[in-house]
Image (cartoon, grey):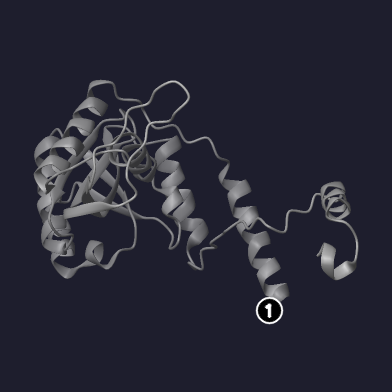
Amino acid sequence: MATEIGISVSSVQRIWRAHGLQPHRVRQFKLSNDPKFVEKLRDVVGLYVDPPAHAIVLSFDEKSQIQALDRTQPGLPMKKGRLGTMTHDYKRHGTTTLFAALDVLEGKVIGRCMQRHRHQEFIRFLNTIEAEVPAGKVVHVILDNYATHKHPRVRAWLARHERFVFHFTPTSCSWLNAVEGYFAKLSKQRLKRGVFRSVVDLQAAINRFIAETNQLPKPFSWTANQDKIIAAVKRGHQVLDSVH
């Protein structure tokens, strides 16, 4: 811009700074077009803030295609004046998919690694939940709109297990699912810097992380105001409509 306008670079920087302009930065957003956005939002947030009595609330999702990555050369340890280092290239040793359900009231996680994430694996995981959750309690499951979760065989399973109730998040609203925060924590603390020479090593590391979480669980706490979220989404749609 300095060349185009014919002024110094420092002048351009000063003007941008004075007006709070940062043209080199871009923020991303995604607005839900779900016609039942408000209804689903209030339903899910209601489970977080005021869960039903004598019930368990589980936030569920799959973290698919987790890669077992091994570095081509060993990393160098951290020392004075130098960060810990690792090679930028790696070897792939396969993938796994983590099925996880976060108990938002207690903070414990039910997790199981599987090779694929079809409706067959989903039903197997539902059976795992059924076996681990105390009998006599209603199980409210918060999950996204992935087609596998609405498969006819899954619906048939739900018809046979009446204590399970599904609550679907609005489309394009993964941020509303509490287990996504747990996946981010798993990636940052265990997977990002990990070296896994096989899928078995990767699955063992994931299982250890889940076990450590369950030893010191932290209940999930929802703090955002749902009315402010709804208002912000409405403003976003209004701005998009004005642009188009």
Q: In which quarter of the view is residue 156 placed?
A: bottom left
In the displayed structure image, the side of residue 57 where residue 208 appears, left or right: left
> Within 10 Å of the Cα at label 1, are there few (<14), some (14-19), or many (20+) other Cα atoms?
few
In the image, what residue occupies the spot 20% across and 38% down? 206
Q: Residue at x 28, y 53 (%)?
A: 166
The residue nearer to you, when weighing 215 against 52, is 215
Q: Which of 127 and 90 is in front in this view?
A: 90
Q: Which residue is the site of mark 1?
A: 244
Q: Is residue 36 above or below residue 125?
A: below
The image shows residue 127 at horizontal and vertical percentages of: 10, 48
Q: Give how far across and how far down residue 118 sits, in percent.
A: 16, 63
Q: Using the rendered image of the protein, determine whether residue 148 is visible from the camera's viewpoint.
A: yes
At label 1, the amino acid type is His
- Residue 137 appears in view: no
Taking the image as shown, residue 170 lies to the left or right of residue 103, namely right
Label 1: state its secondary structure: loop
Q: Measuring 33% from the left and 43% from the top, which residue is drawn there?
A: 183
Q: Quadrant of the C terminus?
A: bottom right
Across and down, in percent, residue 129 comes to 15, 42
How far across and how far down the image is residue 68, in percent? Answer: 19, 49
**Image height of 50 relative to 80, above or below:** below
Viewer-proximal residue among 74 and 156 = 74
